[in-house]
Amino acid sequence: MALLVAMMLGGCQRQAANDATTVNPAAYDAFYLWPGVHPDKTLQPKTVYLLDGEVRRGGLSRLERLRMGVPRLSGKTVWLVVRADRLDWNETTYAAIFDDLNRWREAGNRVAGLQIDFDAATRGIDTYETFLRDLRQRLPRSWRLSITGLMDWSAHGDPQALAGLARIIDEVVIQTYQGRTTIAGYEDYFRRMEGFPIPFRVAIVEGGQWVAPSMLARQPQFRGYVVFLLSPARSAE
């Protein structure tokens, strides 16, 4: 009997530990929401990052819209997200994105600005900076500019290149997951970010394993979390 009780207690403790480190969206108020993903109605979002479309490889540069219609999310801060596989945008691409920003605002949304979701390599930050500087000059000042960032370049990027980005963008959201899984060893990346010069959020995936690195509590640029919500029918990318 004593052995059985010990086994049951051990199982409960392991389950409690798993629950404590599993990302539960109900504990957060900022979310990534891709088309086709339907969040639980119990969530209370304050900030929502909505994927509007993609700028894909091949052919002429253009915005491939993925969202039907215009969202209407009163009382929430909304970011319009564009995924990019290329940076050689033409005037038509810029015009389509800026038009969507205006239409979303005119529909009554509190639109913060534009986020670019582009996987810039650690050694390619300077090229990305050139693109972002041009985009910032084109983007009306009423819109803020956000980007996603990989943990590798956030932790190992050239300090001068990161300082250059800090003069252009308003925030970076650092991605800590691949697919539906948290990237192993994320603690080591964050230990190298003590002097990161850009305001940043940390993106974590619904249902992923996460224990907050201790440095986040003392990092003055840390602005909180964004949870990537998943649809049961598809994997997050």
Image (spheres, rainbow, N blue to C red):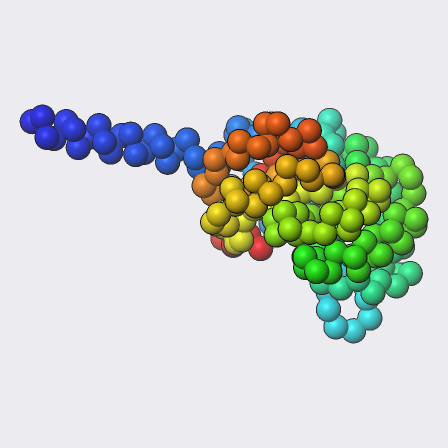
Residue 38 occupies quadrant: top right
Can residue 70 be seen here? The reply is: no
Residue 192 is situated, as x and y percent measured from the top left of the image, at 60, 43
Identify the residue at horizontal 61%, vertical 34% (top origin). Answer: 225
Q: Is residue 48 left or right of residue 140?
A: left
Residue 41 is situated, as x and y percent measured from the top left of the image, at 56, 32
Identify the residue at horizontal 58%, vertical 41% (top origin). Answer: 190
Identify the residue at horizontal 9%, vertical 26% (top origin). Answer: 2
Rendered view: 221 above or below 119: above
Can residue 199 be seen here? The reply is: yes
Residue closer to the observer: 148 or 160 = 160
Rendered view: 171 above or below 5: below
In which quadrant is the C terminus drawn?
bottom right
Q: Is residue 217 left or right of residue 24?
A: right
Residue closer to the observer: 13 or 190 = 190
Residue 208 is situated, as x and y percent measured from the top left of the image, at 47, 43
